Image (cartoon, rainbow, N blue to C red):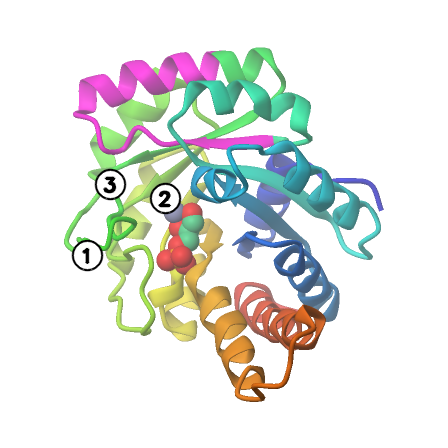
Amino acid sequence: MSLSRTGDLVAAAREAGEGVGAFNVITVEHAEGIVAGAELAGAPGILQISQNAVRHHLGRVEPLAAACALIAETARVPIALHLDHVDDLDLLRRAADAGFSSVMYDASHLEYADNLTATRSAADWAHEHGLWLEAELGEVGGKDGVHSPTARTDPGEAAAYVADTGVDALAVAVGSSHAMTTKSASLDIGLVEKLRAAVPVPLVLHGSSGVLEEDLRRAVAAGLTKINVGTQLNVAFTAAVRRTLTDETLTDPRKYLRPARDAVTETIAQIIRTLTTR
Ligand code: G3H
Ligand code: ZN
């Protein structure tokens, strides 16, 4: 199957009243595990590489993106490739040639007016280069270890922001926070409904690892469509590595990366079943 486009997968999920998972890739095993999990669930998925993951790969986005694109092309379900949490304009400009169909440009840490100006210019550039652009309003915290579950996106401001920037999707702050290792986030479902009514483009949930399955289901029903998950995969991946490495004679990385990849697959299948009716 050829590489799908994020915009198409998100539009189809919204039309069907489902969510589409966007999953953070750090290693090739993550990408393989994510695609295998999507195949198991029989539903599409989005492989996303964050700017932080690019930094881990020595600042080079192309090698991991190429691997993801090739893994997606041989998948039995539609898979798209997304570049996540970018504030480096140089990286944004490399996205179109690296196989991505979409980028999340993250100016959420800026004041409203500065966020709007920077995002409008990123969206203009993205559209000229055939990219679907996601932006964020109402900073979802946690990436720096500082959790801010009280941050909220105002529906009126969100509607004006989308109209003024021309973005294709909006990440909103509704109670989640990045990098949570326990399912203790409390989503404001009433706010999701208000945002869905006020904002014409698909809504994105970041920091979904901290959200209980039943709350994810309610959030999708209320109007969130692209559901970003990273930490939950790494919790499963690393736990599997740790379990395997109790054998201190083990040296072959395949011996601990294989169970780690399998753990990602199981986790992904479970998440996708939660987000869809399959
Ligand atoms: O953009 C990526 C996500 O927001 C992942 O967040 O690692 O808390 O699941 P998470
Ligand atoms: Zn995020």
Pinpoint residue 56: horizontal percent, then vertical percent.
48, 44
Task: Give the foreground label among 2 and 1.
Answer: 1
Quadrant in which residue 273 is drawn:
bottom right
Task: Quickly name the residue at label 1.
Answer: 149
119 relative position to 155: left or right = right
- Residue behind label 2 places its C-beta within 8 angstroms of ligand 1: no
Viewer-closest of 133 and 251 = 251
Horizontal relation, residue 143 to residue 23: left or right:
left
Q: Earlier in the sequence, mark 1 or mark 3?
A: 3
Residue 61: image x %, image y %? 58, 34
Q: Which residues are magenta?
A: 102-124
User: According to the image, label 2 marks what residue?
Assistant: 196
| Residue 107 place in picture, x, y as percent | 30, 28
Between discs 2 and 1, the one toward the N terminus: 1
Residue type marked 1: Pro
- The residue under the point 61% across, 14% down is 129
Residue at screen point 58% across, 83% down: 244
